[in-house]
Amino acid sequence: MTTTDERTSTWAMRDLMLMVVLGVVFGFLYWALVQAWSGLALLMGPAGDLAQHVLLGGWLIVAPIVVAIVRRPFAGVLAEVLASVVEVVFLGSPVGPMLILAAAIQGAGSELPFALRRYRSYGWATFALSGLCGAGLVFVFSAFRFDWFGQDLVELRLVLQLVSGVLLGGLLAKVVVDRLARTGVLDNYAIGRS
């Protein structure tokens, strides 16, 4: 029988490959989300600057998906960073290299609830907390970076971003993971053996 410590301390090649594939795929999806962000910002007119907060949760989704499937420490952080590298290096994200740091922060925040529960809890609450923590942590980073703390809309920015994190980065990730698991394609991963 494999102990929890043995199970989480080694990476199987299939786990690494899945993390890389999902990181690359979500790098492309995240780039597409940047295009949606630009379009939404135009549609929102003077309030267009808030569009990033409405969609922010979409940039958090790969971390909880990968963590739930492979159940390895740092899987979410690595997947987010890989997605950002694809976005910056191969797709020319307008955010630039700073996106890689933001992705590491997003991944760490998104993975934190799973880590605090020792990678044993994969219910709705854990996924919701994943989105909340990922969105909250990157909000603090961005608020200092863009000096939002002195603005009138800081509370609105925070609320929009946290709600988006919970809905898109947390609960939508849970839906995706559950639907994938039901197909049987994940049976050879930790999620399929649990």
Image (cartoon, grey):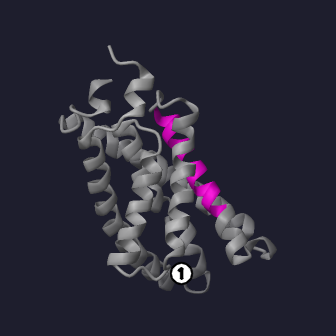
Q: Is residue 4 above or below residue 136?
A: above
Task: From the top left corner, tell me how far across and down residue 147 is, in percent.
Answer: 74, 76
Front residue of 12 and 190 = 12
Quadrant containing the C terminus is top left
Query: Does 79 sit left or right of 166 as displayed?
Result: left
Query: Does 168 sit left or right of 153 as displayed?
Result: left
The residue beneath circle 1 is: 44
Front residue of 148 and 80 = 80
The residue shown at (56%, 81%) is 48
Task: From the top left corner, tell me how far across and down residue 190 is, in percent.
Answer: 31, 31
Q: Secondary structure at mark 1?
A: loop
The residue shown at (56%, 39%) is 113
Residue sticking out furthest to the right? 150
Quadrant containing the N terminus is top left
Identify which amino acid the numbered label 1 is placed on: Met
Task: From the top left corner, tell me how far across and down residue 26 is, in percent.
Answer: 34, 61
* Res. 122 image quadrant: top left
* Res. 29 image quadrant: bottom left
Front residue of 21 and 150 = 21
The residue shown at (35%, 66%) is 27
* Highlighted magenta segment, given as a residue range: 123-139
